[in-house]
Image (cartoon, rainbow, N blue to C red):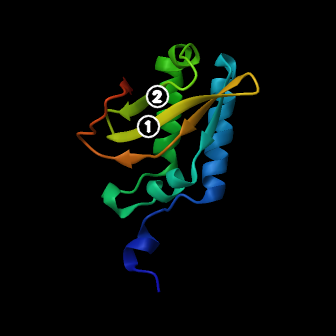
Amino acid sequence: MKTFSQYIFERVSKSDLDQIEKYADRLFAAVGIDVEFTRHFLDRVNDERNKKPINQAELVRLFRLTYKKHGKKIGNMNPNAQAVIHDMETDVNMPFVLNLRKGMLDLVAKTVMRKKDFKTSNQKLRV
């Protein structure tokens, strides 16, 4: 049985994530990057620990601003490089790794979370 909050909050489905991935792929294609999401990403995007749920618009905004501000920089990173994209307005953090596959870089979004003071030893790309 669903709780009241599950009816109120818009959950991000697998098909929603597929649409966001297509959008991000189109953006980052100009710098030779393909965007992928892990299964853990889908689990974590709808996690209650985010306090306020992460919605589709926030994810689209995150990719749009990241491409605009850091697209070329990410495109020039080495394979196996890791970093965290941090949206300073919404406190959404998205750690990623770059994998080289068939001569193209894959930006693999490992997870996502809303956290004000996210700690990492990796480079933070702020948007």
Q: CA distance from mark 2 to mark 1?
A: 7 Å
Q: Identify the residue shown where x is 37% and y is 42%.
A: 92
The x, y position of residue 1, in whole percent, is 47, 86
Do labels 2 and 1 touch, CB within 8 Å? yes
Q: Residue 83: which quarter of the image?
A: top left
Any mark on residue 82, and which?
Answer: 2
The percent position of residue 106, horizontal first and vertical second, equals: 64, 31
Which residue is found at the position 57% from the left and 54% from the top?
A: 39
Of marks 2 and 1, the one in the foreground: 2
- At mark 2, the secondary structure is strand
Q: Which residue is at the far front?
A: 80
Query: What residue sits 39% from the left and 57% below the top?
Result: 53
Image quarter (top left, top right, bottom left or bottom right) of the C terminus: top left
* Residue 113 in picture, x, y percent from top left: 38, 48
User: Could you say which is closer to the camera, residue 16 or residue 79?
Assistant: 79
Res 118 quadrant in image: top left
- Say which amino acid is labelled 2: Gln
Q: Which residue is mark 1?
A: 95
